[in-house]
Amino acid sequence: MEQRKVLLSIMVVGMFSSAALAIAPMGPPVAGLAEGQYAVGLGYAMSDQTLEVSGLVSATGDAEIDVESNMYYGCIGYGISNEWSIGVALGMADAEFDADGSGSDFDGDSNFGFAVVTKRTLHDNGTDTKWGTIFQYCRGSSEDKTGASPASSTYGNGATTSVGANKKLELEWYEMQLALGPAVQVNEDVCVYGGPFLHFVEGDLEIQGSQYEYELEQRLELGGFIGALINLGGSASLSLEFLITGEAWGAGIGAMFAL
């Protein structure tokens, strides 16, 4: 029983996503709470991703922007059964991306966001390894205002219309991730996990005073993730994770407490 202590308290690590724009850590791809058990957690994650821009098609190069995001979150998880867990995360996230040339960069504020996740254990060898799957969905937003100078700015290599000084830009998005893989108890205090995952992002960029609305999108991407859980003693665990696709990467750290 002691050997599997960490595996039985890992559900809440899957809530890194919170309000993340772009790729977000997910946690182990297996249910980690006993039936009727709760867990709470908090953490920080960061990500970087290239998104395609569509709307006014006049880009001088690739119609895309590179978005960076930082996230802070709190979450709660619940074990529906020993093989099925769900959770909800609430937090704050920002979004940042550069303007073309010497334009006014988008340095978005931290706004509220949320995420929901469900995990299902598909196979348990009864000793040190579980296989399972995760589905994760989150929404968020961020906004900023162009500076007093320069007089105009564009984004995405000219993919947007010219934005005047002191104009508000508002970005809203949602993302989905689906993963499959194992979680392996290396010893009494360490569990490692990982596997392949699918990732999709879609968002809208609205510009004050403009008749255009721009869609930001990353089509379905295949990537990989790897992470570790470290038992801190009692019901507390520390989690570390890294994810990557052809268009993005993300990393996070968090603490969780089984109740």
Image (tube, rainbow, N blue to C red):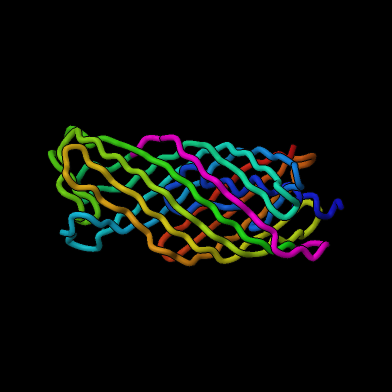
Residue 225 horizontal/vertical position (percent): 56, 61
Residue 190, quarter of the rendered image:
bottom right
Residue 38, quarter of the rendered image:
top right
Residue at the farthest left position? 151
Residue 60, quarter of the rendered image:
bottom left
Residue at the farthest front position? 80
x 42%, y 42%: residue: 140
Q: How many circles with numbers are drawn on the protein?
A: 0
Tell me if residue 101 can be seen. no
Vertical arrangement, residue 64 with respect to residue 8, above or below:
below
Residue 198 horizontal/vertical position (percent): 50, 63
- Magenta-highlighted residues: 108-129
Residue 94 horizontal/vertical position (percent): 41, 40
Say if the magenta span includes residue 97: no
- Tell whether 245 sits left or right of 169: right
Chief secondary structure of the magenta span?
Answer: strand
Residue 9 horizontal/vertical position (percent): 73, 47
x 18%, y 55%: residue: 56
Say if the magenta span includes residue 111: yes
- Tell whether 90 sits left or right of 221: right
Tell me if residue 206 can be seen. yes
Q: Nearer the viewer, residue 154 or 196?
A: 196
x 48%, y 47%: residue: 138
- Quadrant the C terminus occupies: top right
